[in-house]
Image (cartoon, grey):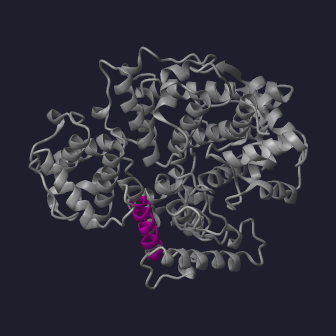
Amino acid sequence: MGLSSQELQDAKEAFSAIDINGDGRLTASEISQLFKNLNEPLPGFKVREMIAEVDTSGNGTVELNEFVNMYEKVKTTKTSYGLADGAKNAKVVKEIGGTSDASAHGTKHSFSSEETASFSNWVNTILGKDAELASRLPINEDTDDLFKAVHDGLLLCKLINSSVAETVDERAINKKKLNMYTIHENQTLVLNSASAIGCNIINIGAQDLMDGKPHLVLGLTWQIIRIGLLSKISLKENPNLAALLKDGESLSDLLKLSPEQLLIRWVNYQMEQAGCPRRINNLTKDITDSEVYTHLIYQVAPEGSGVTMAPLNAGNDLSKAGSMLDEADKIDCKNFVRPADVVSGHPKLNLAFVANLFNTYPCLEARDDGLGDIDLGDMAETREEKTFRNFMNSLGVNPFVNNLYEDLRDAIVLLQILDKIKPGCVEWNKVNMPPFKAMSANMKSIENCNYLVQLAKEMGFSLVGIGGTDINSGNKTLTLALVWQMLRAYTIAVLQSLSGDGKAVSDSDIVSWVNLTLKSKDKTSTISSFKDQTISTARAILDIVDCIKPGAPNFDLVVENPTSDEDKMMNAKYAISMCRKIGARTYALPEDITEVKPKMVMTIFACLMSRSFQKK
């Protein structure tokens, strides 16, 4: 019989409400949290049964189309543990706690007023002094002004740069005489730049951002903010995190922890330093009474700040939260949460609140045993590793990849990527899905890794000397070799799908296309291979951009025949942003151009070749 258009919209809005991390899929923990919030907690096995009923892809999560099927089934049969009521209630919770506004197309969308206010406040805080945004900042936190402020793409470009510096070359942004076409270019630049830093932009289009669709704007904004906040919570950025090591642990153990886990450990460390017996296991239900926050703020606050422990005697939880935030305001760390967000244990906003507090006042001292002074060497994340990790996360893999080696050991993420390269190649009923029992966890992970290697070989990957145990053990060299081939295969698969004939595309084919395209437009630049040192000037890349979209690059901004590293870098930064602006989703960095890294250079030209096919 099918859902009505309104019921379909309800299902989509409910999905957005439940999708806590905004990655486009529901995990068992997110569905479990939904029912906890509705005071209808379900045992883990029932949640897994619910997922199994609709999980056609077999990846252990529920995507939007699967959720719609689940929703439709429940609407007609009233089964599956009351999910229809749960989804409906999730939507109502968002509408009660937030607002409902009409989109540009007249359709009502629910979105979180808490998140709208929180993200607006953060934008005001970090971009408030930007002269180019003066006409739209500060954003009124209690209205929908945020969704209007992002219309032309300028604010989002600057927000991306605030999270990961120099991701967007502002010379590539259209700032004057804007129209729907130049604004669309800006939003394309936003999306491809966001993807390059690890944001999942699946199902978000440039027009969605131009229209200010609330749930999509909030989802992307959160990802950008989250990446910026959590990027500083690492040993590379703060070596004094070594103070959080427990007895018997080494720095390698600390490197395995996600930023969220490090934050929780940091809070507990500060509780110990403060002499407070409380400890937390999460940043949701364990912080709702504001007691831990009060001790934390008092402990890390600079001397003379005037912070007190008064919130402990403030009355009910809501009053305590308000008083606690007054104390946080004394050290300029009130961002992200309001009293109700603390009391409700809002997952995103409390994570952001604590992350901002850590970034501002880490209050960690170097260990006296010298561990904090150790050169991290090859333990710190390399540029190549970060690029590969961002590539994976931009595809919406689950779980989110924080550590390129530790988070791949059970092969779940890598199998998802193979399935995106060649849809349907993974038989998910053959994959062991976590959580695993402790006794069999390693064995099941190795089985997954062996299956991964088998599939990769069948797809033509060169895996000489690489076995499942190498991936499971986190062998860096061999894992990088496999992941690089995945990035290459994904790039080529996209290219082949757009070529029309579906034939295999080789490196020489791409080089030939580059030179033929340049020649057809009377360009003088050429390349002999992806190792050609003239690529370091970025001229050939910018010329290809100009061939695909004539007039797009402003060559007045390009240094002719650059010889200095500085001039080459300026050209490379502009070239990367111009590629993204015309729709080429490249994960390469400017350094890959100036240093002429053949592998990543190949991906740049392959992405441009794909874009040219799209134009046709």
Residue at x 51% of width, y 27% of height: 123
- Please say whether residue 385 is one of the residues in the magenta stretch: no
Residue 452 vs residue 384, the one in the foreground: 452
Q: In this rendering, does residue 100 appear at all?
A: yes
Looking at the picture, how far across and down is residue 316, in whole percent?
86, 27
Residue 447 position by quadrant: bottom right
Mostly what secondary structure, the magenta segment?
helix
Looking at the picture, how far across and down is residue 340, in whole percent?
76, 27
**Outermost residue toward the top?**
135
Residue 504 vs residue 175, the one in the foreground: 504
Residue at x 49% of width, y 78% of height: 457
Q: Is residue 324 above or below residue 431?
A: above
Residue 352 position by quadrant: top right
With 210 as the anchor, is 275 left or right in this view? right
Q: In this rendering, does residue 36 appear at all?
A: no
Q: Quadrant of the N terminus?
A: top right
- Please say whether residue 492 is one of the residues in the magenta stretch: yes
With 485 as the anchor, is 27 left or right in this view? right
With 191 as the anchor, is 298 left or right in this view? right
Residue at x 62% of width, y 66% of height: 412
Q: Quadrant of the C terminus?
A: top left
Q: Is residue 237 above or below residue 434?
A: above
Where are the magenta residues, as a range? 478-493
